[in-house]
Amino acid sequence: MSMKFDIQPASNPTPEKDRVAKLVDPGFGRVFTDHMAVVRYNQAKGGWYEARIEARANFQIDPAGAVLHYAQEIFEGLKAYKRDDGGVNLFRPDANARRFKDSADRMAMAQIPEDVFIEAVEQVVRIDRAWMPGGEGSLYLRPFMIASETFLGVKPSSEYIFAVIASPVGSYFKGGPAPVSIWVSENYTRAAIGGTGAVKCGGNYAASLRAQAEAIQHGCDQVVFLDAVERRYVEELGGMNVFFVFDDGSLSTPPLGTILPGITRDSIIALARDAGKTVREEPYSLDQWRKDAASGRLKEAFACGTAAVISPIGKVRSVSGDFEISGGAAGPVAMVLRKQLVDIQYGRTNDPHSWIRKVF
């Protein structure tokens, strides 16, 4: 199914002078472009209709709108990167489109066709290309969908709004990736088998905020969750997947099931295997992590995700004691993988897996 988007440019876009000023130091997720994509769904009207690119504006939603009461909501995160030749790349948008459909399926929401998802993202990049920052900056794209039916019964909504907004972002780390410290959450869990851990829904993130606040109280940057059944195995951070690097050159990462199937995670597994490294997807306990860090068997640990790409983990803190990994410094494996991935995203090197989609 393909839909033609009705393009309605904003009548009063941000003046160039103001836009340039905002792009100097945009931070993350605080500055927004002039336009958004919106596609509506109504079961009674036969599905998806009215695909538009329009001026970014508030939604009108009834106080009894389903999303406000039952949290039927999903989202994605991906970036557009400016190449040295002035063109723009998207990185694996097809994987985001597929994951969005999987999320919709789990949350009993209407599934937007993958080509419509990708077209909406591309149209926003095209109309707001002047908002692309240079250097290590990028245009962060946030496709999302909310249940908009006015009804207080507990059932899947029969109406949805799918939208894409865009936010120029600077480099996540000023002066290169600094190792982060993480707090092990022993009171809160993120997801259980059969739950929504593998889904990118707002509720997962809402449930992680209390644990993240606890991490900050303990002087840490991020929280890491353990499995909900045994409270032993490392699962993922508040918003990132995690990898471990061993003295024999192999890597390990927690298996899928209750964790988000990260696109950066999947890309790192592929690049590490391309380089001849063994990558295992297997459970890894906090006790083992502590032991391996002490013995030197564990050489590096790092987190990964769309926003930061790769963050080395330097220190782990928990109620049962703290430990450091490799003296708290960024490790070479993480840094090599990070450079490789970023170079592919910005089109500075060849793209062996055809991950890049050129918008122009």
Image: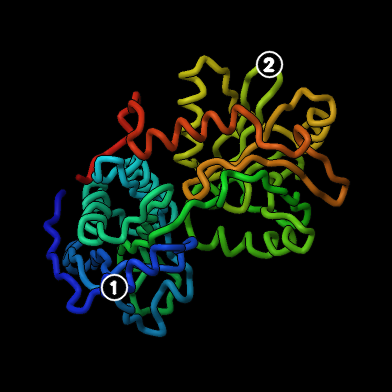
- The reply, left or right, for residue 224 in relation to residue 87 is right
Q: Nearer the viewer, residue 108 or 249?
A: 249
Residue 228 in sight in this render = no
Front in this rendered view, residue 268 or 101: 268
What is the total number of numbered labels drawn onto the structure image? Answer: 2
Image: 83 above or below 344: below
Quadrant containing the C terminus is top left
- The type of residue carrying mark 2 is Asp
**Whether residue 28 can be seen here:** yes
| Amino acid at circle 1 | Arg
| Image quadrant assignment for residue 329 | top right
Q: Tell whether 120 sits left or right of 225.
A: left
SS type, badge 1? loop
**SS for tag 2?**
loop
Q: In the image shown, does 180 or 114 lie closer to the viewer?
A: 180
Residue under pointer 1? 56
- Left or right position of 182 against 345: right
Say if 249 sits above or below 106 in the image: above
* Point 31% across, 46% down: residue: 82
Q: Dot 1, how many residues are within 10 Å of its Cα: few (below 14), some (14-19), or many (20+)?
A: some
Number of other residues with Cα within 10 Å of mark 2, as a class: few under 14, some 14 to 19, many 20 or more:
few
Residue 38 image offset from top left, x and y in percent: 25, 66
Name the residue: 33% across, 28% down: 351
- Determine the CA span between mark 1 and mark 2: 51 Å
Q: Residue 110 in the image: x percent, y percent?
A: 31, 58
Question: Looking at the image, is mark 1 or mark 2 earlier in the sequence?
Answer: 1
In x, y percent, where is residue 70? 48, 70
Residue drawn 20% across the image and 65% down it: 53
The residue pinned by badge 2 equals 248
